[in-house]
Image (cartoon, rainbow, N blue to C red):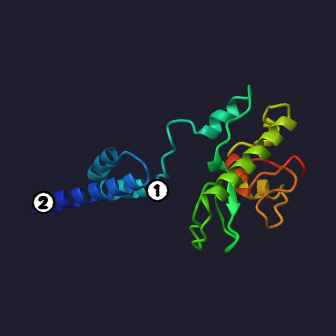
Amino acid sequence: MITGILFVQAVVFAVLSGVVASNNNRDATKWSIIGFLFGLFGFIAAIAVGEAEETQPSSRQTSQSSSTSTQEFDPDDHEKKCPDCAEYIKLEARVCKHCGHEFSEEEVEQQVEERRESVKESESANGGKRDEENYKSDEYDTEEILSTHDFNGVGICEDCDYTKGYVKANNYVCPGS
């Protein structure tokens, strides 16, 4: 009788540990085994361990490590401010996820092209190379990096012409500060 109860308990913790691990982008099978063997302690460990990092380097990491030529323009690194609700959304978004404001296809393409040109101008001012000294590693505080920019409510820094989303994604410190 006690063995049956312990077995059911082990199975329950195995399932719970697997679900938690799966939600945190970790291997559910391995964590299920840990939950089965260690019960409550395995389940607590599955909760306590942080979300797994990607195994492949992100495009930001690879572009930061290569300083040989200009980086590719990635619209996902840029944001725009919705004219209705003033929330930041992805540059290529056609509909604001906050208020539902719709942008026309031409308007989106124009915004992407304008941002691409401003990035090219920034790079050409630096001789076609990214100014690596202004890109900080991930251990820097985001708020500290954002404080080096002058966004003035428009979402684009007046000194470096980068958006708040780009600055956050790339840990870019404004050279004008």
The residue most toward the top is 68
Q: Mark 1: which amino acid?
A: Ala
On the question of residue 140 being in view, the answer is no
Question: Residue 99 at what x, y percent from top left?
Answer: 59, 74
Give the crowd class for mark 2: few <14, some 14-19, many >=20 residues within 10 Å.
few
Q: In terms of image quadrants, where is residue 59?
A: top right
**Residue at coordinates 18% horizontally, 60% vertically from top-left?**
8
- Residue under the image location 72 percent in, 55 percent down: 142
Which one is closest to the eye, mark 2 or mark 1? 1
In the rendered image, which quarter is residue 69 located in?
Answer: top right
Please provide percent x and percent y for residue 38: 31, 52
Query: Viewer-proximal residue, 135 or 91?
Result: 91
> Disc 1 designates what residue?
48
Any part of residue 11 in sight: yes
Kindly identify the amino acid type of the residue bearing the numbered disc 2.
Gly
Residue that mark 2 sits on? 4
Q: Residue furthest left?
A: 1
